[in-house]
Amino acid sequence: MLLSITGLSKSFPGTRALDNVTFNLEAGEVHALLGENGAGKSTLIKCLTGAYQRDAGEILLNGQAIHPRSTNEAQDLGIGTVYQEVNLLPNLSVAQNLLFGREPLRFGMTRGRAMRAEAEETLRTYGLDIDVTRDLGSYSVAVQQIVAIARAVQLSGKVLILDEPTASLDAEEVRMIFEVVRSLRDRGLGIIFVSHFLDQVFDLTDRLTVLRNGQHIVTERTSSVDRMQLIEHMLGHQLEEVEEKARSARGSEPDARPELLRFEGLGRRGDVEPFDLRVGQGEVIGLAGLLGSGRTESAEIMFGARAAQSGTARDADGAIAIDTPRNAIAAGFGFAPEDRKTDGIVADLSVRENIILALQASRGWARPIPRSEQKRLADMFIYRLDIRTSDAEKAVGALSGGNQQKVVLARWLAMNPRFLILDEPTRGIDVGAHAEILLLIQEMTAEGMSILVISSELDELIAISDRVIVVRDRRHVAELTGADIDRDTIVRSIAAPDAADGKAA
Amino acid sequence: MSRTLLRIAPQAITLVVLVALISVVFPGFLDISISDGRLVGPAIDILKRGASVALLAVGMTLVIATRGIDLSVGAIIAICGAIAAWGITNDYSLGTTLMMAVAAGLLAGLWNGTLVAVIGIQPIVATLILMTAGRGVAQLITEGRILTFSNDQFAYLGSGDLFGIPVPALLWPVTGVLFAIAMRRTALGLLIEAVGINRRASALAGINATLLLIAVYMASGFCAALAGIITTADIRGADANNAGLWLELDAILAVVIGGNSLMGGRFSIAASLLGAMIIQTIDTGILLAGFPSEYNLVIKAGLVIAILILQSPRLGATWTYWRYALFSRQRGGATQAVREGQE
Amino acid sequence: MNARTYPLLATIAIFLIAYAVCYTQYPTMLSTRVIGNLLTDNAYLGIVAVGMTVVILSGGIDLSVGSVIAFSGVFIAVILRDTGLHPLIVFAALLFISTAFGAAMGGLIHSLAMPAFIVTLAGMFLARGAGYMLTIDSVPIDHPFYEAIDDAYWLMPGRGRFTLIGGIMLLSVLVGMIVAHRTRFGASVFALGGGEQTARLMGVKTGRTTVLIYAFSGFMAGLSGIVFSIYTGSGYPLATVGTELTAIAAVVIGGTLLTGGAGYVFGTLVGVMTMGLIQTYIVFDGSLSSWWTKIVIGALLLFFIVLQKGILHISQTGGARPAESR
C-alpha cells in the first residue's frame, strides 16, 4: 500500500468536514475520489497536502506516518498536487515554470540553453513538443496542465493528486491528459483523481471512493460499479420520510397553477445551451444535476449575473429585462448564490445592514430606509428565520454558515420577490438549520412566491419541488412532474450517458 | 451618536494629547485674541492652514472606502486653481469662474472614475496618469506663469473672514458636515461601504457599483476643486507647479490616521478630518515649539509606521493565534486560525 | 512571439520614431554630443529606475527613492565637509545605509502585510526628514576626487562626452537585466508579481524575496544619489522631489506592467531615454514649454496602461475556447 489514511477527522467551527475517513491508494493505480460539494473531498486533499492540519487520524506513506505541515513539505515527502486552476505562473516561460527553484546555474546565473534543453527533454516524455521559452500563459489549459503534472511528478514522484484537472478542457484535451496519466500510472505512481465527470471516472480510474457529508461511503473497483449506484452513493438518501410526505401531498394537488414567468431560449455558449422554462405562481422548481452540469450557470443567466447570448423572459404583461441583476431585481427576482462568502454576504457589514441591502439598493440612495424600519425588519427576520446572533448589529462575517445563509435569505424576503432563485441553499449548514430552511421555502410558496432551488441533495429536491428539471452536460435534458419526481427517475436522467454530445463538459 | 463618538475617540484623544504637549513647550499655543475684528492665534492658524488637506481628506475618505485611492488630487488642485485664476483674469464673473473650476474638478473625477470602474484599471495606476499629466495641463492654462489677479471678492474666499473666522477654516468643516450628512442621512454611506467590502456581492444585491465608484471619484475631484479655489484665492494667484504639491500624500495620510482601512469598507469622515488636523497641528506645533521644521517629516514617518503596525492584518492574526492557542485544546487548531485569519 | 514582448517592442518603436521625427527637424539630434548628454543627464534617473523596475515587477512600488537620492546627496556632502574621509569610504557607508533602509521597508511590508504604497510613503517622509536633519541648505562638494570624476569621460568621435556616470548607468541596467532575467532571485521576483499565493506554492520564500527586492531598490537609490551628487556637485535636501514618480513613469513607458509580473529592465532604459528625448526636443525647439513634457508623458502612460490592459484582455479571452469562458 503506497498511501493509507485511517480515521481521518477534521472539524471547522460549525461543521465536521471529515469524520473518521478511510482511504487507500496503491502504487500504479488511478483512484477516483468522488462526492458533491461539501462532501469533504477538498478537505481530505488539503489534509494530505499540508494545507490543513488534521484533528485526528493517521496518514501512512510507504508505511511511514507523515504529518505534512505545508504544501512544500508534502511535496518533499512525495505528494504532488495539480489543481483545476493551474497553479503555475502564466507570466513565466514553460521552462522557468517546469524548473522553478531547480534552474541549472553557472556563476549564479541561470543557463538558458541548458534549462531549455532539460525542459524540452522532460516534456518530450509527456508527448509534448513545444517551444519552452514562450510564456506558459500563451498555451492552452491542457498544455499548462501537463506542464503542471510534469513539475509535480519531478518534485514529488510518489503520489500525484489531480484535483479536477479536466474541468475546463474539451474532449480532445481530456484524452491528452488521460494519456499522460496512464503513462504515469504505468511508471508506478499512485494517482488520486478528483472529478465530477462520471464518464471520465469510468474511463480512467481503477478504483473509486465516494465521500458524502464528510464520511466515507464506499470504496470499490470502478469496473464493478454501475453509474446509477454511483450517483446514489454520491447524492445520498437522508430525508426519506419528508419525501414520502411531500409526494402524497403532491399527488392530491392538481397542476393548475397560473403562469407567472416564461423564459424562452435563454442560453450562453459554453455555459448552458438555450433552454425554455415556465414558472407557475407559487411553484417550487427543482434544478437537479451534478456539479458542473450547468445548473448554476442557468440560474445566473436567469438573474442577469451572467449575460445571456440569446433568449427572452416575459411575464403576463409582456417582455421583461433581465440583462443585469438590477433589472432582474426590478422585475421581482431574487438570487441567493451558491458561494455565500464571495457572492452573498458583505462580511464586515452588520446583520441589519445585510438584510436591508437589496431593499435599499432598489429604493435608491436618496430614499434611505428609516433606522427604526431597518431595525424592525432586521429584528423580524432574526426572529422569523431564527437567525442566531447576539444582536442585529453584529458583523455578518462572524456568524456561522447556516446563519449567514439565513441572512441572505432574509435580504431577499425583505424584498418580497415573486421569483426567488436559491443556489444550494442548504450546503454546509447544520441539520437543524437545514430543516428550517426547507420549511421556510414551503411557507413562502404558500404565500404565492415562486422558487427555483438548485441542490445536490436529491431528497431535498424531491421533498420540496413541484417540478424538477434535470441538467446534464450543460443542457436541460428532462422535466419531471407529479409522480415522476422520484429518486430513480432523477438519477436515471442524470446518469444517462449522452453519445450525441462529444464534449467532456 | 455614541457610536460615532467612540469611533473618533482615538483620533480626538491623539489630537488633545498633541495639543497638550505643544502647550507645555509653547504656553501660548491655545491663546486666541481679537485683532481688527478677527480671531488670531495658533489654533486659528491651524484651522486655516489645514483646510486644503482637510478638504481633500473628505473626498479621499470616500475613495478609500471603496478600496481605491486617488493620487491625482494634488494635480486637480493645480488645474482648478489655474482655471479659477484664468477665469477671473479674463473678466468672467466670480460665480462663473467658480463654476468652471468646480466643473473641472468633477470632470477630472469622471475621468478617474471611468478608468477605474468602467475600464477596470487599478485605482493607483489609473489616477497616476492624471497625477503626472495634470500639472502639465494646469501649466497649459497658466501658460507656465504664476497667474496673479486682484479680485478682492475672489481673494476673500482664501484670506477673508466671516464672523472673525478665516473663510477656509469655515469651508472645510462645512464641507465635511455636508458630506457626512449626505452619506449618513441617505443610504450612500452604506452602499459605498458595501461596494468597498464586497463589490460582487453588492452588485448581486442590486447596487449599481459602477456608478457609485464613478461618483466617489467625482466627489474627490469636487473636494480637490474646492481646495484649489481657496489655495488660489489665498495667494491671489495660481502656481501650477506648486499648488497642492504632494497634498495627495497628506490627504491619504489623514484618512489613514483617521483609522480608515486602505482595504476599504467602514469609513468616518469626521475621523479623517481629525486626522488632517493632527497632521497640521504637528506641522504648526513643531514650528511653534521651537523645534526646527526638519523634524516634521521624521515625526510624520514615525506616526505612519505606528499606525500601520496597529492596523496590520497580520498582527491581528497573531493576536488571534495566541488567543486561540491559550483557550483551545484542539491540536493544530491554532495554526488553522492564523491561516484563516490571513485569508 | 510572446504577447508580453509587445509593450517592449512598442516602447522601442516609439523611441525610434520619436528620434527620427526629432532628427528630421534638428539633424544635430543624432550627434554623439546629444547622445552623450542624454546618457549623462538621465544617469541618476536610469539607475533608480532599474531598482524601481525590479520592485514593480514583483507587484510592489517604492515611493521612497526620490527622498533617498536627496538624502544620499546631503549625507555625502555633509560628511565630506565635516570629516576628512575619502569619498569612496563615504560612498560605501551610504550604500550600506540605503540598502539597509530598503531592506527594512521590505521587512515591514512583509511582516505587517501592508500595502507597499503606504509603507514606502512612510519611508519617503523618513528619508527626506533625515536629509533635513543633516542640513536644510544646499551644501557644495568640492573635493579633488569629485573634480577627477568630473573629468573622467571618453571623448567620442564627434566631440560627444561619454561620462563616467553615464557608464555607471548603463552598467546598472546591465546588472539589472542579469538580476531580473537570469537569476533565481529574478525568477522569484516575477513569480511574486504573477501571484503571491502561487509563488509560495512554487516554493518562493516570499519574505526573504520581498526584503531583497526593496534592498535592491534601496541600493540603486543610493547609487543614484551618488551619481546625482557627482552630476550636481552638491547635496540638497529638497532635490529630486517627485523622482519616484518620474521613475515609475519611465518603468511603465518602458513596457513593464504596473501591476507586476511582466516587463523588461532594458525597456526601462528605453523609457528613460524616451523621456529624456522629449525634454531634449523641447530644449531644441525653444518655443515649446516644459509642461508639454508632463502632458506627453501622461499620454504615453495612458497608452501603455491601456495597451497592457488590452493585451491582458486578449490573452485571457481571445485564445480561449468556449469551455473556458466561464
Image: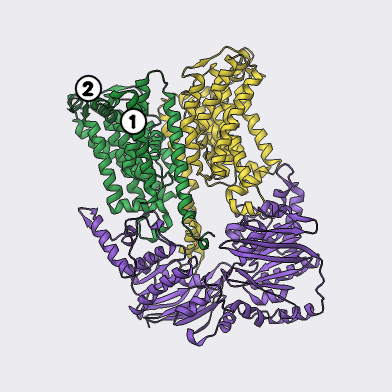
SS at mark 2? loop
In the rendered image of the structure, the colour used to display chain C is green
> Which residue is disc 1 drawn over?
C20
Foreground: B321 or A331?
Answer: A331
Relative to A20, is A11 above or below?
above
Foreground: C188 or A14?
Answer: C188
- Give the residue displayed 39% in from the left and 35% down from the top: C244
Q: Which mark is residue C189?
A: none
Is C240 placed left or right of B218 in the picture? left
SS at mark 1? helix
> Which residue is disc 2 drawn over?
C142
Of all chains, the one bearing label 1 is C
Residue A143 image point, x, y percent: 40, 64
Foreground: A163 or C111?
Answer: A163
Residue C194 image point, x, y percent: 41, 53
Outermost bottom residue: A224
In the rendered image of the structure, the colour used to display chain A is purple
